[in-house]
Amino acid sequence: MPYPENKEFTTILAKIDAWLGKGLPFAVYRKPKQEKVTAVFQGNDVLHKTIDFEDEGFVFAPFDLKDNAILIQPDELLTGTFKTESQVGKNMIEISESGKETHINLVRKGISEIEKGHLKKVVLSRKMEVEFATSPVKIFQSLLNHYTNAFCYLFHHPKVGTWCGATPETLVEIKDKQLRTMSLAATLPFQGDKKPMWGLKEIEEQRMVSDYIQERLGPAMEELHIGQTESVRAGNLWHLRSEVTGVLSSGNAIKKVITALHPTPAVCGIPTQAAKSFILENENYERSFYTGFLGELNLSKVGETALFVNLRCMELQGKTAAIFVGGGITSASQPESEWIETQNKSRTMLNIL
Ligand SMILES: C=C(O[C@H]1C=CC=C(C(=O)O)[C@@H]1O)C(=O)O
Protein backbone atom coordinates (compact mmCIF):
# COMPACT_ATOMS: atom_id res chain seq x y z
CA MET A 1 0.00 0.00 0.00
CA PRO A 2 1.29 3.55 -0.63
CA TYR A 3 2.75 5.60 2.20
CA PRO A 4 0.06 8.10 3.20
CA GLU A 5 2.48 11.05 2.97
CA ASN A 6 3.25 10.28 -0.66
CA LYS A 7 0.58 12.44 -2.22
CA GLU A 8 2.04 12.21 -5.74
CA PHE A 9 1.70 8.43 -5.78
CA THR A 10 -1.89 8.62 -4.48
CA THR A 11 -2.67 11.17 -7.23
CA ILE A 12 -1.30 8.73 -9.84
CA LEU A 13 -3.52 5.91 -8.51
CA ALA A 14 -6.62 8.14 -8.53
CA LYS A 15 -5.87 9.26 -12.07
CA ILE A 16 -5.39 5.66 -13.26
CA ASP A 17 -8.84 4.83 -11.86
CA ALA A 18 -10.31 7.86 -13.62
CA TRP A 19 -8.57 6.99 -16.93
CA LEU A 20 -9.83 3.38 -16.73
CA GLY A 21 -13.33 4.72 -16.07
CA LYS A 22 -13.17 7.08 -19.05
CA GLY A 23 -11.54 4.48 -21.31
CA LEU A 24 -8.41 6.54 -21.99
CA PRO A 25 -4.87 5.24 -22.60
CA PHE A 26 -2.11 5.31 -19.97
CA ALA A 27 0.99 3.46 -18.82
CA VAL A 28 2.41 3.49 -15.31
CA TYR A 29 5.70 1.86 -14.36
CA ARG A 30 8.63 1.58 -12.00
CA LYS A 31 12.12 0.59 -13.14
CA PRO A 32 14.06 -2.18 -11.31
CA LYS A 33 15.36 -1.28 -7.83
CA GLN A 34 13.94 2.25 -7.95
CA GLU A 35 11.30 3.98 -5.89
CA LYS A 36 10.26 6.43 -8.60
CA VAL A 37 6.97 5.63 -10.31
CA THR A 38 6.17 7.32 -13.63
CA ALA A 39 2.74 7.59 -15.26
CA VAL A 40 2.10 8.62 -18.85
CA PHE A 41 -1.47 9.73 -19.60
CA GLN A 42 -2.84 10.31 -23.09
CA GLY A 43 -5.72 12.80 -23.36
CA ASN A 44 -7.70 11.02 -26.11
CA ASP A 45 -8.25 7.44 -27.27
CA VAL A 46 -6.34 7.67 -30.58
CA LEU A 47 -4.27 4.56 -31.36
CA HIS A 48 -0.79 5.95 -32.08
CA LYS A 49 1.97 3.78 -33.50
CA THR A 50 5.71 4.28 -33.62
CA ILE A 51 7.70 2.96 -36.54
CA ASP A 52 11.15 4.47 -36.08
CA PHE A 53 11.09 4.63 -32.25
CA GLU A 54 12.12 8.29 -32.42
CA ASP A 55 8.83 9.54 -30.90
CA GLU A 56 8.32 10.59 -27.31
CA GLY A 57 6.16 8.47 -25.02
CA PHE A 58 5.63 4.95 -23.75
CA VAL A 59 6.03 2.18 -26.30
CA PHE A 60 4.20 -1.16 -26.16
CA ALA A 61 5.44 -3.49 -28.88
CA PRO A 62 4.19 -6.97 -29.85
CA PHE A 63 6.37 -10.08 -30.29
CA ASP A 64 5.84 -9.93 -34.04
CA LEU A 65 6.90 -6.42 -35.09
CA LYS A 66 4.98 -6.60 -38.36
CA ASP A 67 2.05 -5.49 -36.15
CA ASN A 68 3.46 -2.06 -35.30
CA ALA A 69 4.36 -0.87 -31.83
CA ILE A 70 1.76 1.16 -29.91
CA LEU A 71 2.74 4.55 -28.47
CA ILE A 72 1.07 6.26 -25.51
CA GLN A 73 1.59 9.97 -26.00
CA PRO A 74 2.69 11.84 -22.88
CA ASP A 75 -0.04 14.50 -22.76
CA GLU A 76 0.43 14.41 -19.01
CA LEU A 77 3.43 12.96 -17.20
CA LEU A 78 3.25 12.37 -13.42
CA THR A 79 5.86 10.97 -11.06
CA GLY A 80 5.67 9.77 -7.47
CA THR A 81 7.51 7.42 -5.15
CA PHE A 82 6.56 4.05 -3.79
CA LYS A 83 8.36 2.47 -0.84
CA THR A 84 8.04 -1.30 -0.67
CA GLU A 85 6.43 -2.49 2.53
CA SER A 86 7.25 -6.17 2.45
CA GLN A 87 8.21 -8.84 -0.02
CA VAL A 88 5.93 -11.69 0.85
CA GLY A 89 6.52 -14.91 -1.03
CA LYS A 90 3.40 -17.04 -1.45
CA ASN A 91 4.59 -20.16 -3.18
CA MET A 92 1.98 -22.60 -2.08
CA ILE A 93 -0.82 -21.85 -4.56
CA GLU A 94 -2.12 -24.93 -6.37
CA ILE A 95 -1.86 -24.53 -10.12
CA SER A 96 -4.17 -26.23 -12.60
CA GLU A 97 -2.57 -28.94 -14.76
CA SER A 98 -4.82 -28.03 -17.65
CA GLY A 99 -2.97 -27.77 -20.97
CA LYS A 100 -0.17 -30.10 -19.85
CA GLU A 101 -0.44 -32.61 -22.69
CA THR A 102 -0.60 -29.91 -25.36
CA HIS A 103 2.46 -28.13 -23.96
CA ILE A 104 4.45 -31.34 -23.60
CA ASN A 105 3.64 -32.26 -27.22
CA LEU A 106 4.75 -28.80 -28.35
CA VAL A 107 8.03 -29.17 -26.45
CA ARG A 108 8.56 -32.65 -27.98
CA LYS A 109 8.03 -31.18 -31.44
CA GLY A 110 10.56 -28.41 -30.65
CA ILE A 111 13.15 -30.96 -29.47
CA SER A 112 12.60 -32.99 -32.64
CA GLU A 113 13.25 -29.88 -34.80
CA ILE A 114 16.47 -29.32 -32.86
CA GLU A 115 17.51 -32.97 -33.31
CA LYS A 116 16.90 -32.67 -37.06
CA GLY A 117 19.32 -29.72 -37.06
CA HIS A 118 16.73 -27.10 -38.10
CA LEU A 119 17.07 -25.15 -34.84
CA LYS A 120 19.57 -24.80 -31.99
CA LYS A 121 17.13 -23.35 -29.49
CA VAL A 122 13.46 -22.37 -29.45
CA VAL A 123 11.40 -20.68 -26.73
CA LEU A 124 7.96 -22.29 -26.48
CA SER A 125 5.11 -20.82 -24.52
CA ARG A 126 1.46 -21.05 -23.59
CA LYS A 127 -1.35 -18.99 -22.16
CA MET A 128 -3.37 -19.91 -19.06
CA GLU A 129 -6.56 -18.23 -17.94
CA VAL A 130 -7.61 -17.64 -14.33
CA GLU A 131 -10.42 -15.71 -12.69
CA PHE A 132 -9.53 -12.85 -10.36
CA ALA A 133 -11.47 -10.61 -8.00
CA THR A 134 -9.25 -7.56 -7.52
CA SER A 135 -8.73 -4.31 -9.50
CA PRO A 136 -5.93 -3.32 -11.91
CA VAL A 137 -4.81 -0.56 -9.51
CA LYS A 138 -4.51 -3.04 -6.61
CA ILE A 139 -2.67 -5.48 -8.86
CA PHE A 140 -0.16 -2.77 -9.80
CA GLN A 141 0.46 -1.92 -6.13
CA SER A 142 0.93 -5.58 -5.38
CA LEU A 143 3.46 -5.92 -8.23
CA LEU A 144 5.43 -2.98 -6.81
CA ASN A 145 5.44 -4.57 -3.37
CA HIS A 146 6.43 -8.05 -4.46
CA TYR A 147 8.96 -7.48 -7.22
CA THR A 148 11.45 -4.75 -6.37
CA ASN A 149 14.06 -6.14 -8.79
CA ALA A 150 11.68 -6.11 -11.76
CA PHE A 151 10.33 -3.54 -14.19
CA CYS A 152 6.70 -3.38 -12.98
CA TYR A 153 3.99 -1.88 -15.13
CA LEU A 154 0.30 -1.45 -15.87
CA PHE A 155 -0.72 -0.50 -19.42
CA HIS A 156 -4.15 0.32 -20.77
CA HIS A 157 -5.40 1.34 -24.18
CA PRO A 158 -9.12 0.92 -24.95
CA LYS A 159 -8.24 -0.27 -28.47
CA VAL A 160 -5.50 -2.68 -27.31
CA GLY A 161 -6.36 -3.96 -23.83
CA THR A 162 -5.04 -3.92 -20.27
CA TRP A 163 -1.73 -5.59 -19.50
CA CYS A 164 0.53 -5.71 -16.46
CA GLY A 165 3.68 -7.50 -15.42
CA ALA A 166 6.95 -7.64 -13.52
CA THR A 167 9.72 -8.48 -15.95
CA PRO A 168 13.32 -9.36 -15.02
CA GLU A 169 14.68 -8.67 -18.52
CA THR A 170 16.03 -5.42 -19.94
CA LEU A 171 15.92 -5.24 -23.75
CA VAL A 172 18.07 -2.13 -23.95
CA GLU A 173 18.81 1.08 -22.06
CA ILE A 174 20.54 3.91 -23.89
CA LYS A 175 21.78 7.19 -22.43
CA ASP A 176 24.25 9.47 -24.23
CA LYS A 177 25.46 6.62 -26.50
CA GLN A 178 26.08 4.41 -23.42
CA LEU A 179 24.21 1.19 -23.94
CA ARG A 180 23.21 -1.41 -21.39
CA THR A 181 21.48 -4.72 -21.99
CA MET A 182 21.65 -8.23 -20.56
CA SER A 183 21.94 -11.83 -21.54
CA LEU A 184 19.29 -13.61 -19.48
CA ALA A 185 18.29 -17.26 -19.65
CA ALA A 186 17.85 -20.49 -17.68
CA THR A 187 15.52 -20.98 -14.74
CA LEU A 188 15.54 -22.78 -11.40
CA PRO A 189 13.04 -22.39 -8.55
CA PHE A 190 14.06 -20.16 -5.64
CA GLN A 191 14.24 -22.32 -2.49
CA GLY A 192 15.16 -20.23 0.52
CA ASP A 193 18.87 -20.17 1.35
CA LYS A 194 19.75 -22.91 -1.15
CA LYS A 195 22.14 -21.71 -3.87
CA PRO A 196 20.99 -22.62 -7.40
CA MET A 197 22.91 -25.56 -8.89
CA TRP A 198 23.13 -24.90 -12.62
CA GLY A 199 23.60 -27.80 -15.01
CA LEU A 200 25.26 -27.84 -18.43
CA LYS A 201 21.87 -27.39 -20.16
CA GLU A 202 21.31 -24.04 -18.40
CA ILE A 203 24.88 -22.80 -18.83
CA GLU A 204 24.79 -23.57 -22.55
CA GLU A 205 21.32 -21.98 -22.92
CA GLN A 206 22.54 -18.69 -21.43
CA ARG A 207 25.82 -18.74 -23.37
CA MET A 208 23.83 -18.92 -26.62
CA VAL A 209 22.07 -15.68 -25.65
CA SER A 210 25.40 -13.95 -24.88
CA ASP A 211 26.88 -15.08 -28.21
CA TYR A 212 23.82 -13.81 -30.05
CA ILE A 213 24.06 -10.36 -28.40
CA GLN A 214 27.77 -10.17 -29.25
CA GLU A 215 27.11 -11.11 -32.87
CA ARG A 216 24.06 -8.88 -33.41
CA LEU A 217 25.17 -5.81 -31.48
CA GLY A 218 28.92 -5.93 -32.13
CA PRO A 219 28.84 -4.20 -35.55
CA ALA A 220 26.86 -1.22 -34.16
CA MET A 221 29.20 -0.62 -31.22
CA GLU A 222 32.48 1.18 -30.57
CA GLU A 223 32.91 -1.01 -27.51
CA LEU A 224 31.01 -4.00 -26.16
CA HIS A 225 31.64 -5.77 -22.90
CA ILE A 226 29.88 -8.92 -21.70
CA GLY A 227 30.25 -9.32 -17.94
CA GLN A 228 30.54 -12.41 -15.77
CA THR A 229 27.57 -14.73 -15.55
CA GLU A 230 25.76 -14.51 -12.22
CA SER A 231 22.65 -15.98 -10.60
CA VAL A 232 19.88 -13.40 -10.18
CA ARG A 233 16.62 -13.75 -8.33
CA ALA A 234 13.33 -12.89 -10.05
CA GLY A 235 10.53 -13.43 -7.51
CA ASN A 236 10.27 -17.16 -6.87
CA LEU A 237 12.84 -18.02 -9.56
CA TRP A 238 16.56 -17.89 -10.29
CA HIS A 239 18.02 -16.99 -13.68
CA LEU A 240 21.50 -16.77 -15.15
CA ARG A 241 22.46 -13.29 -16.30
CA SER A 242 25.42 -11.42 -17.77
CA GLU A 243 25.34 -7.63 -17.85
CA VAL A 244 26.23 -6.19 -21.26
CA THR A 245 27.56 -2.65 -21.57
CA GLY A 246 29.02 -0.64 -24.40
CA VAL A 247 29.26 2.52 -26.43
CA LEU A 248 27.18 2.90 -29.58
CA SER A 249 29.05 4.06 -32.66
CA SER A 250 27.77 7.30 -34.21
CA GLY A 251 24.96 7.13 -36.70
CA ASN A 252 23.29 4.09 -35.17
CA ALA A 253 19.63 4.89 -34.66
CA ILE A 254 17.61 3.31 -31.89
CA LYS A 255 15.60 1.32 -34.45
CA LYS A 256 18.77 -0.40 -35.61
CA VAL A 257 19.60 -1.44 -32.05
CA ILE A 258 16.05 -2.66 -31.37
CA THR A 259 15.86 -4.72 -34.53
CA ALA A 260 19.33 -6.15 -33.87
CA LEU A 261 18.22 -7.39 -30.45
CA HIS A 262 14.51 -8.16 -30.70
CA PRO A 263 13.42 -10.95 -30.49
CA THR A 264 16.34 -12.19 -28.38
CA PRO A 265 16.97 -15.94 -28.00
CA ALA A 266 15.59 -15.55 -24.46
CA VAL A 267 12.12 -15.25 -26.03
CA CYS A 268 12.47 -16.63 -29.59
CA GLY A 269 15.41 -18.89 -30.42
CA ILE A 270 18.39 -19.60 -32.69
CA PRO A 271 18.47 -19.08 -35.65
CA THR A 272 15.99 -16.25 -35.07
CA GLN A 273 13.91 -16.50 -38.26
CA ALA A 274 13.56 -20.29 -38.19
CA ALA A 275 12.65 -20.21 -34.47
CA LYS A 276 10.14 -17.41 -35.05
CA SER A 277 8.46 -19.32 -37.89
CA PHE A 278 8.30 -22.45 -35.73
CA ILE A 279 6.69 -20.47 -32.90
CA LEU A 280 4.14 -18.75 -35.15
CA GLU A 281 3.19 -22.03 -36.81
CA ASN A 282 3.11 -24.31 -33.78
CA GLU A 283 2.24 -22.50 -30.57
CA ASN A 284 -1.46 -22.49 -31.44
CA TYR A 285 -2.29 -19.22 -29.73
CA GLU A 286 -1.37 -15.61 -30.36
CA ARG A 287 1.45 -14.21 -28.15
CA SER A 288 0.44 -10.65 -29.09
CA PHE A 289 2.36 -8.45 -26.58
CA TYR A 290 3.90 -11.27 -24.49
CA THR A 291 7.64 -11.41 -25.37
CA GLY A 292 7.33 -8.05 -27.10
CA PHE A 293 8.93 -5.05 -25.39
CA LEU A 294 7.83 -1.93 -23.60
CA GLY A 295 9.11 1.20 -21.90
CA GLU A 296 10.02 4.83 -22.24
CA LEU A 297 11.18 6.58 -25.39
CA ASN A 298 12.76 10.03 -25.12
CA LEU A 299 10.72 10.83 -22.02
CA SER A 300 13.39 12.31 -19.75
CA LYS A 301 15.66 13.53 -22.55
CA VAL A 302 15.87 13.07 -26.33
CA GLY A 303 17.95 9.97 -27.07
CA GLU A 304 17.29 8.39 -23.68
CA THR A 305 15.50 5.08 -23.86
CA ALA A 306 14.73 2.25 -21.42
CA LEU A 307 13.02 -0.81 -22.86
CA PHE A 308 12.16 -4.11 -21.19
CA VAL A 309 11.06 -7.48 -22.54
CA ASN A 310 7.42 -8.26 -21.75
CA LEU A 311 7.80 -11.39 -19.58
CA ARG A 312 5.99 -12.50 -16.39
CA CYS A 313 2.98 -10.62 -17.61
CA MET A 314 -0.76 -10.98 -18.05
CA GLU A 315 -3.65 -9.47 -19.94
CA LEU A 316 -6.66 -8.46 -17.83
CA GLN A 317 -10.05 -8.83 -19.50
CA GLY A 318 -12.99 -8.22 -17.18
CA LYS A 319 -12.48 -10.70 -14.36
CA THR A 320 -10.24 -13.05 -16.33
CA ALA A 321 -6.46 -12.85 -16.40
CA ALA A 322 -4.53 -14.49 -19.23
CA ILE A 323 -1.06 -15.37 -17.91
CA PHE A 324 1.72 -16.00 -20.45
CA VAL A 325 4.63 -18.34 -19.71
CA GLY A 326 7.35 -20.00 -21.74
CA GLY A 327 10.79 -21.55 -21.60
CA GLY A 328 13.89 -22.11 -23.70
CA ILE A 329 14.08 -25.53 -25.33
CA THR A 330 17.44 -27.02 -26.31
CA SER A 331 18.52 -30.55 -27.26
CA ALA A 332 19.01 -31.28 -23.55
CA SER A 333 15.44 -30.33 -22.56
CA GLN A 334 13.12 -32.75 -20.74
CA PRO A 335 9.45 -32.12 -21.67
CA GLU A 336 8.12 -32.78 -18.14
CA SER A 337 10.68 -30.39 -16.59
CA GLU A 338 9.81 -27.74 -19.15
CA TRP A 339 6.15 -28.04 -18.17
CA ILE A 340 7.05 -27.63 -14.46
CA GLU A 341 9.19 -24.61 -15.35
CA THR A 342 6.22 -22.86 -16.99
CA GLN A 343 4.07 -23.73 -13.97
CA ASN A 344 6.69 -22.13 -11.70
CA LYS A 345 6.89 -19.06 -13.91
CA SER A 346 3.12 -18.62 -13.73
CA ARG A 347 3.44 -18.10 -9.95
CA THR A 348 4.98 -14.67 -10.51
CA MET A 349 1.56 -13.42 -11.64
CA LEU A 350 -0.63 -15.91 -9.70
CA ASN A 351 0.97 -14.77 -6.42
CA ILE A 352 -0.40 -11.27 -6.78
CA LEU A 353 -3.92 -12.06 -8.01
C1 LIG B 1 10.18 -16.92 -21.81
C2 LIG B 1 10.26 -16.65 -20.52
O1 LIG B 1 11.44 -16.48 -19.83
C3 LIG B 1 12.67 -16.32 -20.52
C4 LIG B 1 13.56 -15.50 -19.67
C5 LIG B 1 14.37 -16.06 -18.70
C6 LIG B 1 14.54 -17.45 -18.65
C7 LIG B 1 13.98 -18.24 -19.60
C8 LIG B 1 14.16 -19.72 -19.57
O2 LIG B 1 14.73 -20.25 -18.60
O3 LIG B 1 13.70 -20.43 -20.45
C9 LIG B 1 13.29 -17.68 -20.79
O4 LIG B 1 14.23 -17.59 -21.82
C10 LIG B 1 9.04 -16.47 -19.70
O5 LIG B 1 9.16 -16.10 -18.53
O6 LIG B 1 7.91 -16.65 -20.21
Image (tube, helix red, strand yellow):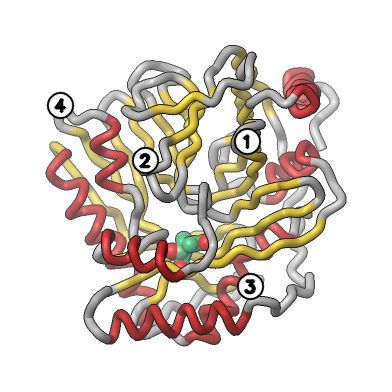
* Structural distance between the alpha carbons of marks 3 and 2: 28 Å
Using a 10 Å C-alpha cutoff, classify the residue at mark 1 as few (fewer than 14 neighbours), some (14 to 19) or many (20 or more). many
The amino acid sitting under disc 3 is Gln
Residue at image point 50% right, 36% down: 60
Instruction: Examine the rendered structure and indicate whether residue 186 appears above or below residue 223.
Output: below
Q: Which mark is first along the chain, 2 or 4?
A: 2
In x, y percent, where is residue 102?
Answer: 57, 79
Residue under the point 25% across and 53% down: 213
Residue 55, quarter of the rendered image:
top left
Q: Which mark is residue 155?
A: 1
Residue at (17% x, 54% y) in the render:
215
Compare marks 4 and 1 and give the one earlier in the sequence.
1
The residue where tag 4 is placed is 250
Upstream in the sequence, badge 3 or badge 2?
A: 2
- Whether residue 179 appears in this view of the structure is yes
Foreground tag (4 vs 1): 1
Disc 3 crowd, CA 10 A, few/some/many (<14, 14-19, 20+): some
Return the disc, 1 or 2, that comes first in the chain's sequence: 1
Label 2 environment density (alpha carbons within 10 Å; few <14, some 14–19, many ≥20) = many
Q: Which residue is mark 2?
A: 172
Which residue type carries mark 2? Val
- Indicate the position of residue 279 as horizontal and vertical percent values: 40, 65
In the image, 244: left or right of 18? left
Which residue is painted at 59% across and 59% down in the image?
Answer: 324
Q: Considering only order in the chain, which callout, 3 or 1, is on the residue closer to the N terminus?
A: 1
Q: Residue 174 placed where, x, y %?
A: 34, 32
- Amino acid carrying label 1: it is Phe
Q: Is residue 41 visible?
A: no
Mark number displayed over residue 343: 3
